Image: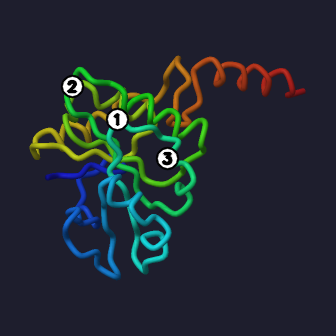
Amino acid sequence: MPLVKDGKITGDEFIHVADDAEVPGGGAILLSSTRFLGDPEALSRRAGKTGVIWPNNRDLDDLVPYLDRLAVVALVFPTFRDGRAYSQARLLRERHNYRGELRATGQVLRDQFLFMLRAGFDSFEVKKPADAEAFAITVKRYSVFYQPTGDGRMTALHRRMMLRHSESASP
Protein backbone atom coordinates (compact mmCIF):
# COMPACT_ATOMS: atom_id res chain seq x y z
CA MET A 1 0.00 0.00 0.00
CA PRO A 2 1.50 3.39 -0.98
CA LEU A 3 2.39 5.80 1.81
CA VAL A 4 2.29 9.59 1.45
CA LYS A 5 4.46 11.41 3.97
CA ASP A 6 5.58 15.03 3.99
CA GLY A 7 3.73 15.52 0.72
CA LYS A 8 5.72 12.83 -1.07
CA ILE A 9 5.16 9.21 -2.00
CA THR A 10 7.59 7.20 0.12
CA GLY A 11 8.35 3.68 1.26
CA ASP A 12 7.04 2.59 4.64
CA GLU A 13 9.84 1.73 7.05
CA PHE A 14 7.32 0.16 9.48
CA ILE A 15 6.27 -3.45 9.12
CA HIS A 16 2.89 -4.60 10.37
CA VAL A 17 3.29 -7.35 12.97
CA ALA A 18 0.30 -9.67 13.38
CA ASP A 19 -1.01 -10.33 16.88
CA ASP A 20 0.16 -13.95 16.79
CA ALA A 21 3.59 -13.25 15.20
CA GLU A 22 6.86 -12.87 17.05
CA VAL A 23 7.92 -9.26 17.61
CA PRO A 24 11.31 -8.55 16.04
CA GLY A 25 13.97 -7.18 18.39
CA GLY A 26 14.94 -4.37 16.02
CA GLY A 27 13.46 -2.46 13.13
CA ALA A 28 10.37 -0.29 12.90
CA ILE A 29 7.11 -2.08 13.67
CA LEU A 30 3.38 -1.31 13.80
CA LEU A 31 1.29 -3.28 16.28
CA SER A 32 -2.43 -3.50 16.95
CA SER A 33 -3.69 -1.66 20.03
CA THR A 34 -4.50 -5.00 21.68
CA ARG A 35 -1.00 -6.33 21.12
CA PHE A 36 0.66 -3.10 22.27
CA LEU A 37 -1.44 -2.76 25.43
CA GLY A 38 -0.71 -6.41 26.28
CA ASP A 39 2.83 -5.42 27.32
CA PRO A 40 3.51 -1.75 26.55
CA GLU A 41 6.57 -1.52 28.81
CA ALA A 42 8.47 -4.33 27.07
CA LEU A 43 7.45 -3.15 23.59
CA SER A 44 8.52 0.42 24.40
CA ARG A 45 12.01 -0.76 25.42
CA ARG A 46 12.80 -2.68 22.25
CA ALA A 47 15.65 -1.46 20.04
CA GLY A 48 13.62 -0.35 17.00
CA LYS A 49 10.87 2.20 16.53
CA THR A 50 7.45 1.15 17.72
CA GLY A 51 4.08 2.29 16.43
CA VAL A 52 0.50 1.38 17.21
CA ILE A 53 -2.62 1.02 15.07
CA TRP A 54 -5.35 2.64 17.14
CA PRO A 55 -9.00 1.95 16.24
CA ASN A 56 -11.39 4.89 16.29
CA ASN A 57 -13.72 3.20 18.78
CA ARG A 58 -11.05 2.85 21.47
CA ASP A 59 -10.49 5.45 24.18
CA LEU A 60 -7.33 7.52 23.66
CA ASP A 61 -6.81 7.71 27.44
CA ASP A 62 -5.49 4.14 27.27
CA LEU A 63 -2.77 5.30 24.87
CA VAL A 64 -1.79 8.66 26.39
CA PRO A 65 0.71 7.30 29.00
CA TYR A 66 2.81 5.79 26.18
CA LEU A 67 2.76 8.58 23.59
CA ASP A 68 6.32 9.71 24.30
CA ARG A 69 7.55 6.21 23.45
CA LEU A 70 5.69 5.81 20.15
CA ALA A 71 7.16 6.83 16.80
CA VAL A 72 3.82 6.38 14.98
CA VAL A 73 0.17 6.36 15.90
CA ALA A 74 -1.93 5.06 12.99
CA LEU A 75 -5.58 6.07 13.34
CA VAL A 76 -8.15 3.99 11.49
CA PHE A 77 -10.91 5.23 9.18
CA PRO A 78 -13.04 2.05 8.85
CA THR A 79 -15.47 3.76 6.42
CA PHE A 80 -15.44 7.13 4.69
CA ARG A 81 -18.51 8.16 6.74
CA ASP A 82 -16.86 7.53 10.11
CA GLY A 83 -14.94 10.62 11.20
CA ARG A 84 -14.00 9.70 14.77
CA ALA A 85 -10.32 9.46 13.80
CA TYR A 86 -10.42 13.19 12.98
CA SER A 87 -11.35 13.89 16.59
CA GLN A 88 -8.68 11.51 17.84
CA ALA A 89 -6.05 13.26 15.70
CA ARG A 90 -7.01 16.70 17.02
CA LEU A 91 -6.93 15.44 20.61
CA LEU A 92 -3.53 13.83 20.14
CA ARG A 93 -2.03 16.96 18.58
CA GLU A 94 -3.73 19.70 20.57
CA ARG A 95 -4.54 18.26 24.01
CA HIS A 96 -1.82 15.62 24.39
CA ASN A 97 0.88 17.42 22.36
CA TYR A 98 1.83 14.29 20.39
CA ARG A 99 4.62 15.22 17.96
CA GLY A 100 5.37 11.83 16.41
CA GLU A 101 4.04 10.62 13.07
CA LEU A 102 0.24 10.58 12.92
CA ARG A 103 -0.87 8.25 10.16
CA ALA A 104 -4.31 7.90 8.54
CA THR A 105 -5.13 4.34 7.54
CA GLY A 106 -8.20 2.47 6.26
CA GLN A 107 -10.63 4.35 4.01
CA VAL A 108 -8.34 7.27 3.20
CA LEU A 109 -9.99 9.03 0.26
CA ARG A 110 -8.76 11.81 -2.03
CA ASP A 111 -11.56 14.23 -1.22
CA GLN A 112 -10.86 13.98 2.53
CA PHE A 113 -7.10 14.35 2.34
CA LEU A 114 -6.96 18.08 3.05
CA PHE A 115 -9.25 17.69 6.06
CA MET A 116 -7.03 14.92 7.41
CA LEU A 117 -3.97 17.07 6.93
CA ARG A 118 -5.64 19.96 8.75
CA ALA A 119 -6.63 17.66 11.64
CA GLY A 120 -2.95 16.87 12.23
CA PHE A 121 -2.21 13.80 10.14
CA ASP A 122 1.17 13.86 8.45
CA SER A 123 1.21 10.49 6.70
CA PHE A 124 -1.43 8.56 4.79
CA GLU A 125 -1.79 4.95 3.69
CA VAL A 126 -3.68 4.92 0.41
CA LYS A 127 -5.07 2.10 -1.70
CA LYS A 128 -3.87 3.16 -5.17
CA PRO A 129 -0.73 4.85 -6.48
CA ALA A 130 -2.93 7.38 -8.31
CA ASP A 131 -4.38 8.48 -4.96
CA ALA A 132 -0.88 8.87 -3.58
CA GLU A 133 0.03 11.13 -6.49
CA ALA A 134 -3.14 13.21 -6.01
CA PHE A 135 -2.38 13.56 -2.28
CA ALA A 136 1.17 14.68 -2.99
CA ILE A 137 -0.21 17.43 -5.26
CA THR A 138 -2.96 18.48 -2.84
CA VAL A 139 -0.54 19.12 0.02
CA LYS A 140 1.03 21.93 -2.01
CA ARG A 141 -2.23 23.44 -3.26
CA TYR A 142 -3.27 25.57 -0.26
CA SER A 143 -1.03 27.76 1.86
CA VAL A 144 -3.45 29.90 3.90
CA PHE A 145 -6.45 28.78 5.96
CA TYR A 146 -9.11 30.58 7.99
CA GLN A 147 -9.75 27.88 10.58
CA PRO A 148 -7.27 26.95 13.33
CA THR A 149 -6.61 23.21 13.48
CA GLY A 150 -4.21 20.53 14.60
CA ASP A 151 -1.63 20.98 11.86
CA GLY A 152 -0.11 24.03 13.52
CA ARG A 153 -0.39 26.36 10.54
CA MET A 154 -1.00 30.03 11.21
CA THR A 155 -4.50 31.19 10.28
CA ALA A 156 -5.22 34.05 7.87
CA LEU A 157 -6.42 36.17 10.80
CA HIS A 158 -3.19 35.65 12.73
CA ARG A 159 -1.14 36.49 9.64
CA ARG A 160 -3.07 39.72 9.19
CA MET A 161 -2.64 40.63 12.86
CA MET A 162 1.10 39.99 12.67
CA LEU A 163 1.40 42.19 9.57
CA ARG A 164 -0.52 45.00 11.26
CA HIS A 165 1.61 44.68 14.38
CA SER A 166 4.86 44.75 12.41
CA GLU A 167 3.64 47.75 10.32
CA SER A 168 2.66 49.70 13.43
CA ALA A 169 5.97 48.87 15.13
CA SER A 170 7.97 50.21 12.16
CA PRO A 171 9.02 53.90 12.40
Q: Position of residue 43 (x, y in %)?
A: 42, 70
Q: Secondary structure at mark 3?
A: helix
- At 43% from the left and 53% from the top, the residue drawn is 101
Most foreground residue, 87 or 165: 87
What kind of residue is marked 2? Phe
Most foreground residue, 19 or 156: 19
Q: Position of residue 71 (x, y in %)?
A: 44, 61
Q: Position of residue 76 (x, y in %)?
A: 29, 40
> Which callout, 2 or 3, points to the residue nearer the camera?
3
Please state, as top left, top right, bottom left or bottom right, where the C terminus lies in the image: top right
Q: Secondary structure at mark 1?
A: loop
* Residue placed under numbered mark 1 in the picture: 56
Count of labels shown?
3
Among the two numbered marks 1 and 2 on one chain, the one whose residue lies closer to the N terminus: 1
| Tags 1 and 3 touching, CB below 8 Å | no
Q: Distance from label 2 to label 3 (Cα)?
A: 25 Å
- At 23% from the left and 47% from the top, the residue drawn is 125
Q: Distance from label 1 to label 2 (Cα)?
A: 12 Å
- At 39% from the left and 45% from the top, the residue drawn is 122
Most foreground residue, 140 or 6: 6
* Residue placed under numbered mark 2 in the picture: 80
Lateral position of residue 73 relative to residue 162, left or right: left
What kind of residue is marked 3? Asp
What kind of residue is marked 1? Asn
User: Crowding near pointer 2: few (<14 within 10 Å), some, many (20+)?
Assistant: few
> Which callout, 1 or 3, points to the residue nearer the camera?
3
User: Crowding near pointer 3: few (<14 within 10 Å), some, many (20+)?
Assistant: few
Is 139 above or below relative to 17? above
Q: Secondary structure at mark 2?
A: loop
User: Crowding near pointer 1: few (<14 within 10 Å), some, many (20+)?
Assistant: some
* Residue placed under numbered mark 3 in the picture: 62
Q: Quadrant of residue 81?
A: top left
